[in-house]
Image (cartoon, grey):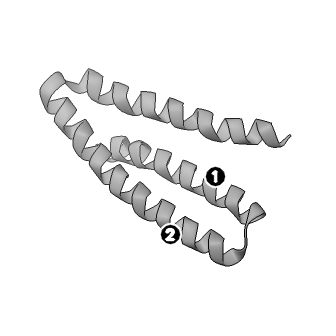
Amino acid sequence: MFFFGFFLGSTYYFIAVTVTADLGRKNSKEATSTITGIVDGIGSTLNGIGQLVVGSMIDALGWRYGFLLPICISTGAMLIPLGIIFSNE
């Protein structure tokens, strides 16, 4: 369960770091810190909700679908930063 929660939460941190790094290059330091706080607050809240949803999904549908949801979320979250990376080159 530790690793399951770790990988579910790490998707959020990957996106938060990518967004913060991208904003840090384009905006002032004050705007970047404000936006980083907003992204961090929303991400932490949604991360907690996501872990509750996965727990409920495991209880209702079984472990297979409980693992399938984070895999789909992680795959989708991986595509967003890749689009940013390739658009800057």
Q: Determine whether, in the image, residue 35 is placed left or right of residue 59.
A: right
Q: Residue at x 28, y 45 (%)?
A: 51
Question: The residue under label 2 is which amino acid type?
Answer: Gly
Residue 5, relative to residue 86: is it above or below? below
Residue 48, relative to residue 33: is it above or below? above
Instruction: Say how many tags the image has.
Output: 2
**Quadrant into which the N terminus falls:** top left
User: Which sits earlier in the primary sequence, circle 1 or circle 2?
Assistant: 1
The percent coordinates of residue 29 (x first, y second) are: 69, 76
Q: Determine whether, in the image, residue 18 is placed left or right of residue 71.
A: right
Between disc 1 and disc 2, the foreground one is 2
Task: Give SS at disc 1.
Answer: helix
- Name the image quarter holding residue 41: bottom left
The percent coordinates of residue 24 (x first, y second) are: 71, 65
Residue ID for mark 1: 18
Task: Give the Cα separation between the discs numbered 1 and 2.
Answer: 14 Å
In the image, farthest residue toward the right: 89
Task: Give SS at disc 2.
Answer: helix
- Name the image quarter holding residue 20: bottom right
Q: Residue at x 56, y 66 (%)?
A: 35
Residue ID for mark 2: 37
In the image, farthest residue toward the left: 60
Q: Determine whether, in the image, residue 26 is placed left or right of residue 43.
A: right
Q: Determine whether, in the image, residue 59 is placed left or right of residue 29.
A: left
Residue 86, relative to residue 40: is it above or below? above
Residue 23, relative to residue 54: is it above or below? below
Question: The residue under label 1 is which amino acid type?
Answer: Thr
Q: Residue at x 35, y 40 (%)?
A: 4
Mark 1: give few (<14), some (14-19) or many (20+) Cα within 10 Å: some
